Amino acid sequence: MRIDILTVLPELLESPLNHSIMKRAQDKKIVEINVHNIRDYASGKHRQVDDYAFSGGAGMVMMIEPIFKLINKLKAEREYDEIIYTSPDGEQLTQQASNILSTKTNIMILCGHYKGVDHRVREHLITREISIGDYVLTGGELAAAVITDSIVRLIPGAISDETSALSDSFQDGLLSPPVYTRPSEFNEWKVPDVLLSGNFKEIEKWQFNQSMERTEKLRPDLLDNE
């Protein structure tokens, strides 16, 4: 898989994309992640990428020309399955969406910034808009990092134990059950006996029941969506 991220602040992506699973996946050639500075495609001495909105009001707007140039350059080199725009009014990122995106070959992510992007970009260049929550960030770089992380960790080989990703919260529409490790007793707090029993059938039954209980208590909306 190849992921191209378009941003006006590439330095914000250096840390989250170059450590832990993201770094290992790139080192193993499982994914290729490229960060592109939109300013490199801007015109003028100051490489301006934003301007005032025609409607007036506070805040600057990302200009269409440098984004158009960069997207066209990348599209001339390869076909993209999705060109994603990070936006607070996009579709909510879900585990199911990440599962689907993890099967793609080439993905482009445009990071929103300032007051937003010239709407013609969204109308004519973007294929999908994704939000990571009902709140506003300073820019879309953190959202792009979250989207990338959620996708890459699902690609076979990115995680050493591939079954681990399959048991994550939301994979089956439920929250994950509680997990424990050694010691089996600490400060008189004990691990549930069933997990120490070695009876895998009973353990699976306990885990499912715990997932249901936690989902009903913490995220009942997930059950309403079934």
Image (cartoon, rainbow, N blue to C red):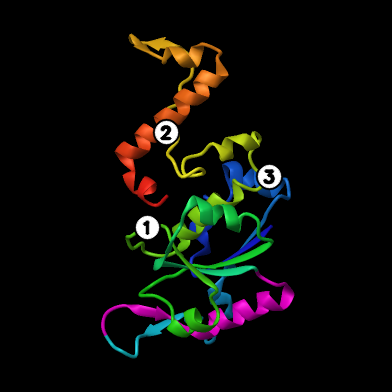
| Disc 2 packing (10 Å; few <14; some 14–19; many ≥20) | some
Q: Nearer the viewer, residue 109 or 168?
A: 168
Residue furthest bottom as drawn: 54
Q: Secondary structure at mark 2?
A: helix
At label 1, the amino acid type is: Gly
Look at the picture and state if 41 lies above or below 170. Answer: below
Disc nearest the viewer among 3 and 2: 2
Q: Nearer the viewer, residue 68 or 87?
A: 87
Query: In this picture, which residue range is highlighted in magenta?
Result: 57-80
At label 2, the amino acid type is: Ser
Q: Which mark is residue 170?
A: none
Look at the picture and state if 18 lies above or below 124. Answer: above
Magenta span includes 29: no
Compared across the picture, whether 18 is left or right of 63 comes to right
| Disc 3 packing (10 Å; few <14; some 14–19; many ≥20) | some
Q: Secondary structure at mark 1?
A: loop
Magenta span includes 77: yes
Res 34 → quadrant: bottom right
**For mark 1, what is the residue?**
133
Q: Secondary structure at mark 3?
A: loop
**For mark 3, what is the residue?**
156
| Disc 1 packing (10 Å; few <14; some 14–19; many ≥20) | some
Q: Position of residue 224 (x, y in %)?
A: 35, 49
**For mark 2, what is the residue?**
211
